[in-house]
Amino acid sequence: MAIPLNLCDLEQLARENLPPAAFGYYSSGAWDEVTVRENREAFNRIEVHYRVLVDVSRRDLSLSLFGDKFSMPIFIAPTAFHCLAHADGELATVRAAGTAGTLMVVSSLSNTRIEDIAAAASGPLWFQLYINKDRVFTKDLVARVEKAGCRALMLTVDTPEWGRRERDVRNCFHLPHGLSAINLIPSNECGEVIGQSGAGMGQAFSWMIDASVTWKDVDWLCSITKLPVLLKGICRPDDAREALEHGAKGIVVSNHGGRQMDTAPATISVLPRIAEAVAGRVPVLLDGGVRRGLDVLKALALGATAVQVGRPVLWGLAAAGQPGVEQALTFLRQEFDLALALAGCQNLKAITRDLVVL
């Protein structure tokens, strides 16, 4: 392939570099993968009604959140098993995040210990978690995360059960020998063979999620940590309002990349109503389908504080390790910066609702 020009090119390089089962795990969605496709297609239906004759010779992409300043409103979403893509795994990703001046949200299902990721980081880290059936383990994991220096917790709330990803089942996806969900090992007797059953992630990790989790458990989580807790997986305004009542300090509009409930709405489609319900009381993040810097502009115009990208980071990692992740983030930053200029915006505050039409 010629020199990659965008995230789509990096995805093609990743496809060429990865074993089919690993590429399938990263790219697949639930059932017929309708939501995977709609996450992307919904962005393309949004029109940008740009301004003209605005001095955009100087543009500021930065934002501050929870006391930290970031170079751009583009974060690395929590995604599992980075060592499937490259031997350096999450260490390469977190170093690239530092170089880009942005945030990495570390997945509970990382192949690398949170302590080691934190040691390699040069910028802030957040940590994504599930409330485990073993509440003592969950509490201990939160304490580890706090001790490692993470600045916020992102609780995934759309997973009472694992979505059925049929590509994984057909591929008998499993972790290669030597890889594990290492931050979760202490709670399971299987130890190093967690995720190596060849049955797909739904069966391999069914022990770690709890279908009985309710809003009371959000209260409990907020009570055992001083870190801000964001809820990831919100797609309804009433759930967003409820989250705030139970102590959430942020909302992540997400459908798990289309990997849980198929035919769930595209996140960009429900974002405006959720942002309206939140009414600026806490940050609102969005993930799902962001593939261009132009998508970032659209998301911010519709009420997002920032976006997260998951699969594109994995494509970059599989294509070229840390430099590949840096390239993915650079593509998005450059495209977003150009989109700001073409839309007549000098900074994030200038991105207003009237710029876009659904």
Image (cartoon, rainbow, N blue to C red):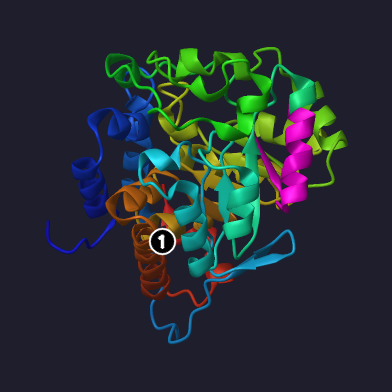
Residue in view at x 31 percent, y 48 percent: 318
Q: What residue did someone put label 1 on? A: 329
Q: Please, what is the three-letter code of the amino acid marked with disc 1?
A: Leu
Give the quadrant of the N terminus: bottom left
* Secondary structure beneath label 1: helix
Residue at image coords 48%, 40%: 79
**Looking at the image, which is closer to me, 94 or 79?**
94
Task: Indicate left or right for 339 with 68 as reference.
Answer: left
Q: In percent of the image, x 31 and y 32: which residue is there? A: 22
User: Extreme right residue here?
Assistant: 223
Residue 248 visible to the viewer: no
311 versus 52 height, above or below: above
131 to the left or right of 246: left
> Quick check: is 154 in the magenta stretch?
yes
Q: Is residue 26 above or below residue 333?
A: above
Crowding around mark 1 (Cα neighbors within 10 Å: few <14, some 14 to 19, many 20+) is: many
Q: Quadrant of residue 73?
A: bottom right
- In the image, is residue 280 part of the stretch drawn in magenta? no
Q: Position of residue 279 (x, y in %)?
A: 70, 49
Percent x, y of residue 111: 50, 38
Residue found farthest to the left: 1
Identified at 45% across, 32% down, the residue is: 179
Please give the range of residues in magenta.
138-157
Is residue 93 placed above or below 201 in the rendered structure?
below
Asked if residue 180 lies left or right of residue 130, the reply is left
Percent x, y of residue 232 = 61, 36
Q: How far across and how far down the image is residue 294, in percent?
A: 37, 59
Question: Residue 29 occupies which quadrant of the picture?
Answer: top left
Q: Is residue 170 visible?
A: yes
Query: In terms of depth relative to the viewer, which is nearer, 103 or 251?
Result: 103
